[in-house]
Amino acid sequence: MPSIPVKTHLVWVVMLFLCLGCIGEDYIDDFVEPTIRINNPITGLQISAMHSYMATYLNNIGQPEDANIMWSSSNESIVTINEQGLATAVAEGEVTIRVSVTVDGNSITDEDTITISSNEMENNEESNKSGTITSTSGYALEGSFTLEASGNNLILSIDDDYSATSSLPGLYLYLTNNPNSINGALEVGPVTVFQGAHSYIIKNAGINDYQYLLYWCKPFSVKVGVGQIN
């Protein structure tokens, strides 16, 4: 039987060490609590104006799934809303729009509280979010970020306080609704900047499409860090 070269042994030892470092004490479980989310919340409407609400139900692995969703208004004398989510401002005041879905006997909801005014109002859809990146492994990864809507695209800006290890092979960044898996996630790309401010342009994505940034060690398929999008 031919012997395995010493160099090959060393390569495998290094690979095993990196894999263990990636995994750390993490236990990977794809389960997340099912949620429903309003995709296009607003802050207000002018009287007689309309807004077509949209919502997405995410199942217990964070994947979009068809569901029988229901819309309601806390005060229909201020805002009415039909079965398709079309809201119409009727009178001045504050009102809460609610979307709900029943799963296994449990009601899951999301809400958007808006103000109705007789004054002309500009586009008031939510346009930016932010969060903090934290390591979930033995490797350095930290920093803050902002996510901003720009037409049909998103601009992800990583701040000056960002720092990440450069010793991991195949570190990738994703947007996802499941912080434990890249199944169904949007791949932003490989991590090539490991210190300081930088940005990504993410095409054809909405500000409310995803809930997390996910840093993933691709060769070993394990989570390295996460940042919730608030």
Image (cartoon, rainbow, N blue to C red):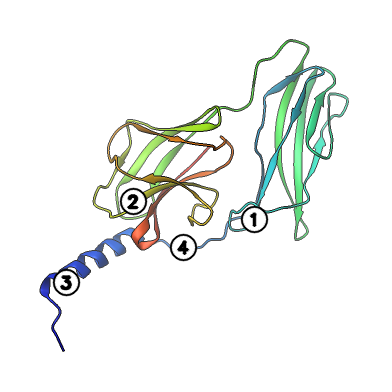
Residue corresponding to mark 4 = 28
Q: Is residue 84 left or right of residue 66?
A: right
For badge 4, the amino acid type reads Ile
State how far apart marks 1 and 4 are (Cα). 17 Å
Q: Position of residue 230 (x, y in %)?
A: 53, 37
In which quarter of the view is residue 104 placed?
bottom right
For badge 1, the amino acid type reads Asn
Q: Position of residue 216 (x, y in %)?
A: 39, 53
Label tally: 4
Q: Point out the tag, 2 or 4, that comes first from the N-terminus.
A: 4
Q: Secondary structure at mark 3?
A: helix
Q: Is the Cβ of the residue at disc 3 closer than 8 Å to that at disc 4?
A: no
The furthest residue to the bottom: 1
Residue corresponding to mark 2 = 171
- Residue 24 visible to an observer of this rendering: no
Callout in the foreground (3, 4)? 3
Quadrant position of the N terminus in the picture: bottom left
Residue corresponding to mark 3 = 8
State how far apart marks 1 and 2 are (Cα). 27 Å
State how far apart marks 1 and 3 are (Cα). 44 Å
In which quarter of the view is residue 52 placed?
top right
Q: Is residue 222 left or right of residue 98?
A: left
Foreground: 189 or 177?
189
